[in-house]
């Protein structure tokens, strides 16, 4: 029987001996095959899944290093699952991604493997399965292959050959009675087809004692077949023999189970495992798996290689309004590190909102393109606000990936860009990445480590928790540093003012799901903090956007009856009273629906 595994899923529960695991898997795939690695972080049920975030990061770092240094056939799209029973996600993935072989780092029959029982894995995985306990796979040495009957013979032989690493194999054949002539003939054929099988032993009693006795005669590992015929009836694929062997030896053990067993007339369909979780658990898992650190993407050469591999271009848009004190340093820092030293970014463009200071002149003197947002798409009119500048920037920026960073940052660093584009380059599933950071605040002339982001904590995050709890894991939904794929950003509307970040987050989540979003720690961001009256106006606009989206989601009507003007308290030395301001964000349609933009895309495609 020919058995070819072109697509292998390797699931591991710790980061030790990764190279040995990968090399073993490489022995089981052809040259054109793929090995996909999944790290499993099992969180105790009394804790929040978000507690697994640090371990998930360690896994990503370890797998990145493995991908860079290994010569094995290693697929780029590795992933780490964080859950109380992460193995359940592996079983679900197998049913949708057509894997041929599942290799599981096995803790043993008395333990849980990734939060799921051994029987769950053997009974539910819709592909061939190898449960492997131990790690000294790169050592050359004889292997004992013990099977009862033929259901797992081909798979077991392949695993034994991979573990033997060029050495010999002893076939220990367990039977219920004395061997008949046809069965002896089958063993002879097996030995003839596999020269590495140099000895064959058949026994009908004392199975555990016989296996252990043989194993101690110089073998380095044991390969056992999972029970099949009897196990279907009793729903217990793991036989008592396997349990006893495991308990009485310290040797590496592999348990094999063929999805399409040999020599069986009937093979019942295996159940599919459906993963259902409550909302809080899903958010916690997302937080652990999709929260990154900018340091993970600090290797700009590695990011450049990913950019070239995917054939994408990257644009950085800088929205600005009277930022002459900081805009020069922002442009110099980003241009020097991300364009001159290494061409990771293809363009940096200033999108100005009619500054009255030297912001535009400084940008032009530094050699970057400058657009005043009222001059972009003049046929659609113009509104005040940062959101308007971002929306119109989609028309002039050329990149496949677009990153925006505010120009009022005083401690600008390249990580503000590579930290938010890195996940998009590395993980094709992601569509949008938000930055988050510590935000010091100046009080009485002194900079305090914490205290910034007041609107975030008093308005945005409470509203998300109330009405969009699936987004409650976003640390700083209002941060001004974020990046997305053009194909995603052009499909959603933009609000013209303070509400732009809120609406983008809600709308992109609705379109691409939680797994399409991520966030990155950009460490510390220092900028000019707004006074309370400015924060009050910001909150007023953001709340209107929340209400608008709540109306659409729940079919309610609130804003029609709401007051759109705000009475601001003016308390100055020579003035005390109320000042009325109209504060309303205008919703711009998805850019893809703007005719001039669609025409530009067609022209660009023809040019390419």
Image (spheres, rainbow, N blue to C red):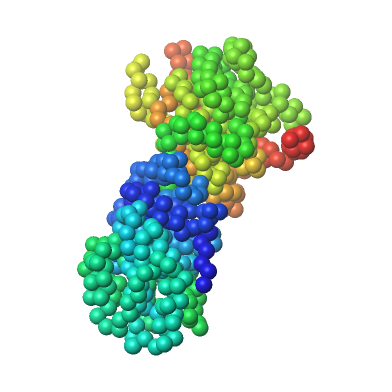
Picture quadrant of residue 508: top right
Q: How many labels does the image show?
A: 0
Q: Residue at x 53, y 17 (%)?
A: 332
- Find residue 528 and report its horizontal and vertical position in percent: 45, 20
- Find residue 536 and report its horizontal and vertical position in percent: 48, 29
Q: Which residue is drawn at 45% across and 54% down?
A: 26
Picture quadrant of residue 496: top right
- Find residue 276 and report its horizontal and vertical position in percent: 45, 62
157, 121: nearer the viewer: 157
Q: Which residue is drawn at 36% across and 60% down?
A: 167
470, 491: nearer the viewer: 491
Indicate the quadrant containing the C terminus: top left, top right, bottom left or bottom right: top right
Q: Which residue is drawn at 38% across and 25% down?
A: 440
- Find residue 378 and report its horizontal and vertical position in percent: 75, 27
Residue 66 placement, left or right of 365: left
Residue 379 appears in the rendering: yes
Picture quadrant of residue 524: top left
331, 25: nearer the viewer: 25
Residue 178 placement, left or right of 472: left
Q: Examine the rendered structure and indicate whether residue 338 appears above or below residue 455.
A: above
Residue 106 appears in the rendering: no
């Amino acid at each position: 029987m020919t058995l070819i595994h072109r697509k292998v899923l390797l699931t591991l529960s710790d980061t030790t001996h990764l190279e040995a695991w990968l090399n073993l898997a490489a022995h089981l795939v052809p040259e054109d095959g793929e090995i996909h690695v999944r790290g499993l972080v099992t969180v105790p049920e009394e804790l929040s899944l978000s507690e697994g975030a640090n371990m998930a990061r360690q896994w990503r770092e370890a797998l990145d290093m493995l991908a860079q240094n290994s010569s094995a056939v290693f697929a780029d799209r590795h992933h780490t699952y964080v859950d109380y029973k992460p193995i359940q996600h592996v079983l679900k993935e197998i049913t949708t991604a057509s894997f041929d072989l599942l290799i599981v780092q096995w803790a043993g029959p008395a333990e849980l493997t990734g939060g799921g029982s051994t029987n769950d894995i053997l009974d539910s995985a819709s592909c061939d399965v190898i449960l492997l306990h131990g790690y000294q796979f790169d050592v050359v040495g004889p292997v004992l292959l013990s099977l009862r009957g033929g259901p797992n013979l081909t798979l077991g032989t392949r695993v034994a050959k991979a573990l033997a690493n060029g050495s010999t194999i002893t076939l220990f054949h367990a039977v219920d009675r004395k061997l008949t002539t046809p069965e002896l003939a089958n063993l002879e054929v097996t030995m003839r087809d596999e020269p590495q099988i140099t000895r064959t032993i058949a026994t009908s009693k004392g199975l555990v004692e016989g296996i252990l006795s043989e194993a101690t005669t110089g073998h380095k590992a044991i390969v056992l077949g999972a029970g099949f015929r009897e196990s279907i009836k009793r729903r217990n694929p793991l036989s008592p023999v396997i349990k006893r062997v495991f308990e009485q030896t310290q040797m590496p053990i592999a348990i094999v189970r063929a999805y399409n067993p040999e020599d069986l007339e009937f093979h019942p369909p295996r159940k599919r495992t459906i993963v259902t979780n409550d909302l809080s658990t899903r958010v916690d898992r997302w937080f652990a798996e999709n929260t990154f650190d900018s340091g993970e993407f600090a290797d700009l050469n590695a990011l450049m290689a990913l950019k070239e591999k995917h054939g994408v271009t990257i644009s950085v848009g800088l929205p600005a309004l009277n930022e002459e004190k900081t805009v020069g340093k922002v442009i110099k820092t980003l241009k020097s590190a991300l364009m001159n030293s290494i061409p990771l970014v293809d363009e940096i463009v200033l999108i100005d909102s009619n500054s009255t200071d030297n912001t535009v002149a400084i940008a032009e003197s530094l050699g970057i393109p400058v657009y005043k947002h009222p001059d972009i798409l003049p046929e659609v009119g113009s509104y005040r606000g940062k959101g308007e500048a971002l929306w119109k920037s989609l028309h002039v920026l050329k990149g496949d990936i677009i990153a925006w960073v505010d120009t009022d940052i005083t401690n600008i660093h390249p990580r503000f860009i590579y930290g938010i584009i890195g996940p998009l380059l590395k993980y094709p599933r992601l569509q949008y990445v938000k930055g988050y950071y510590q935000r010091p605040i100046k009080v009485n002339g002194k900079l305090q480590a914490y205290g910034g982001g007041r609107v975030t904590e008093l308005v945005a995050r409470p509203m998300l928790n109330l009405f969009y709890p699936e987004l409650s894991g976003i640390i700083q939904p209002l941060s001004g540093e974020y990046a997305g794929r053009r194909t995603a950003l052009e499909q959603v509307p933009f609000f013209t003012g303070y509400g732009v970040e809120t609406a983008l987050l809600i709308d992109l989540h609705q379109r691409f799901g939680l797994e399409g979003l991520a966030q990155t720690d950009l460490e510390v961001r220092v900028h000019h903090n707004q006074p309370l009256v400015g924060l009050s106006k910001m909150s007023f606009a953001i709340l209107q956007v929340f209400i608008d989206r709540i109306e659409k989601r729940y079919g309610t009507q609130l804003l029609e009856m709401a007051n759109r003007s705000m009475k601001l308290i003016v308390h100055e030395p020579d003035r005390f009273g109320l000042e009325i301001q109209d504060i309303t964000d205008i919703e711009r349609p998805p850019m893809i629906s703007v005719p001039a933009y669609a025409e530009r895309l067609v022209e660009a495609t023809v040019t390419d």
